[in-house]
Image: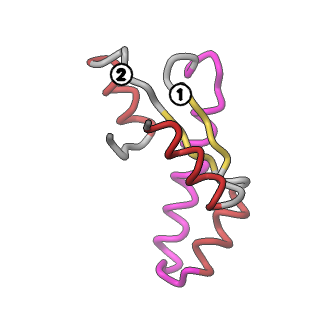
Amino acid sequence: MLDIDINGTEKFLKIFPEANTLFIFPPSIQDLKQRLEDRKTETEATLRIRLRNATSEVEKALKTDETKNLIGFKIINRDISTCTELFVKFTE
């Protein structure tokens, strides 16, 4: 199991096209921003960078024509318990 960004996934699948992939989406970029702010682990600068990167990755992941084989499974992380349950099922 690897935890890689969308660009890493693209490179990985060129080498291992049979691999299963899972993309965990935030419910929205605003929800992601609020979660990061609530954690109080980010500076203003790192928060801007993380949100810019997340926005870019979500946009790329949603482009069906570019990602039909890039993102095999998708989970929207609205609730951590449900998301965890789905993730465990995916890894079984």
**Residue lying at 57% horizontally and 45% vertically, measured from the top left:** 24
**Number of residue marks:** 2
Quarter of the picture containing the N terminus is top left
**Mark 1, secondary structure of its residue:** loop
**Between marks 2 and 1, how big is the CA–CA gap?**
10 Å
Task: From the image, give the main secondary structure of the stretch colored magenta.
Answer: helix
Please indicate whether residue 35 sits to the left or right of residue 7 in the image: right
Judging depth in this view, the residue of 60 and 2 nearest the camera is 2
Q: Is residue 63 above or below residue 49?
A: above
The numbered disc on residue 71 is: 1
Between residue 71 and residue 50, name the one nearer to us: 71
Task: Quadrant for residue 18, please give it.
Answer: top left
Q: Residue at horizontal 51%, vertical 52%?
A: 53
Residue 56 covered by magenta stretch: yes
Q: Amino acid under label 2?
A: Leu
- Segment colored magenta: 39-67
Task: Identify the residue at horizontal 56%, vertical 54% (top origin).
Answer: 84
Most distant residue in the bottom direction: 40
Tell whether 86 sits left or right of 45. right
- Callout 2: helix, strand or loop? helix
Image spot of residue 68 (x, y percent): 58, 17
Residue under numbered circle 2: 13
Residue 56 visible in the snapshot: no
Q: Which mark is residue 48?
A: none
